[in-house]
Image (cartoon, helix red, strand yellow):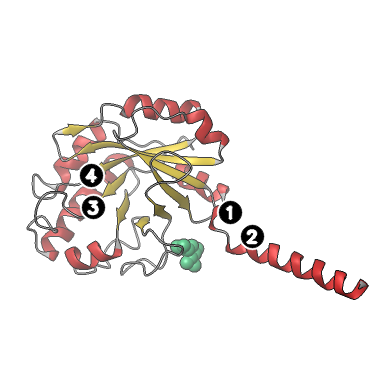
Amino acid sequence: MKLFLSLLSSATAVSSVLGAVLDKRANPKGIDVSAYQPSVDWATVKANGVSFAYIKATEGTTYTNAYFSSQYTGATNAALIRGAYHFAHPDSSSGATQATYFLAHGGGWSSDGITLPGALDIEYNPSGAECYGLSASAMVSWIKDFSNTYHSKTGVYPVIYTTTDWWTTCTGNSAAFGSTNPLWLAHFASSIGTTPAGWSYATFWQYADSGTNPGDQDEFNGSMAGLQAIAKG
Ligand SMILES: *[C@@H]1O[C@H](CO)[C@@H](O)[C@H](O)[C@H]1NC(C)=O
């Protein structure tokens, strides 16, 4: 009986150590929100253990999220690390034009330790050809134009949000961004799956489109100190 109990308690200890190692929730948690979440209770989000947020700022050169300011201010006041994202419309204007529009409407960056680099949301066309009618090489050039423009104005490269499936189809699985742009990969599953060419890991993982907190559910792949370092540049 005594032996049995001690085996039981060491088995429990081993499984809780393994649990901590394997539990993705040990990484800093985040959310991303848009106009679909007009009033976020940021204090509750923070109390639930969320550390960071991405907030939709712009789309193409014709759309700004009407709730951006209040969401961004709310996240700031709740002491979250936060940043903005831009939904790309590569068929409507150049990457440089859209980066400039994003920067003018909330997408800026400074090395204040609480601002994440702006993110380029590049993915399935919501209304039309999956790749917006661009060839893979034209798509890579468009992303480079956006990324280089953002970098020249802020000093940091934008985060790239995508899925492995879209990236493979629409950029020909380009490896051109892995050494410069942090990857934010969407994959709604219990593990992140294959990353696109050029990246050996994802910096951010969007693992669900709903959950305890408003918006999509994300995590940072690293420690809190690592997250703060990205916000520092
Ligand atoms: C997190 O990053 C490490 C490298 O720092 C990598 O080995 C691991 O696969 C990454 N995990 C995810 C879920 O991307």
Image location (x, y in percent) of residue 66: 26, 26
x, y percentage for residue 24?
53, 57
Q: Residues within 10 Å of mark 2 (few under 14, many from 20)?
A: few
Q: Secondary structure at mark 1?
A: helix
Could you tell me if the residues under marks 2 and 1 are in contact, i.e. CB atoms within 8 Å? yes
Q: CA distance from mark 4 to mark 2?
A: 35 Å
The residue to which callout 2 is attached is 20
The image quarter containing residue 142 is bottom left
- Residue 26 is marked as 1
Image quarter of residue 153: top left
Q: Is residue 60 visible?
A: yes
Q: Tell me the amino acid under the disc marked 2.
A: Ala
Find out if the beta carbon at label 4 lies less than 8 Å from the nearest ligand 1 atom.
Answer: no
Q: Are marks 4 and 3 in contact (CB under 8 Å)?
A: no
Q: Quick one: label 4 or label 3, which is nearer the N terminus?
A: 4
Number of other residues with Cα within 10 Å of mark 4, as a class: few under 14, some 14 to 19, many 20 or more: many
For image coordinates 33% across by 63% down, the residue present is 178
Residue 68 lies, with reference to residue 154, above or below; the image says above
Which residue does the image show at 31% across and 53% down from the upper left? 160
Between the residue at mark 4 and the residue at mark 1, the CA separation in whole angstroms equals: 29 Å
> From the viewer's perspective, is 117 left or right of 87?
right
Lower position in the chain sequence, tag 4 or tag 2: 2
Local secondary structure at mark 3: loop
How far is mark 3 from mark 1, CA to CA?
28 Å
Amino acid found under the numbered disc labelled 4: Phe
In 3D space, how far apart are the residues under numbered discs 2 and 3 (Cα atoms)?
33 Å
Q: Residues within 10 Å of mark 3 (few under 14, many from 20)?
A: many
- Label ID, residue 122: 3
Mark 4 and mark 3: Cα distance apart in space: 6 Å
Q: Can you identify the residue that label 4 sits on? A: 87
Q: How many marks?
A: 4
In the rendered image, which quarter contains the C terminus? top left
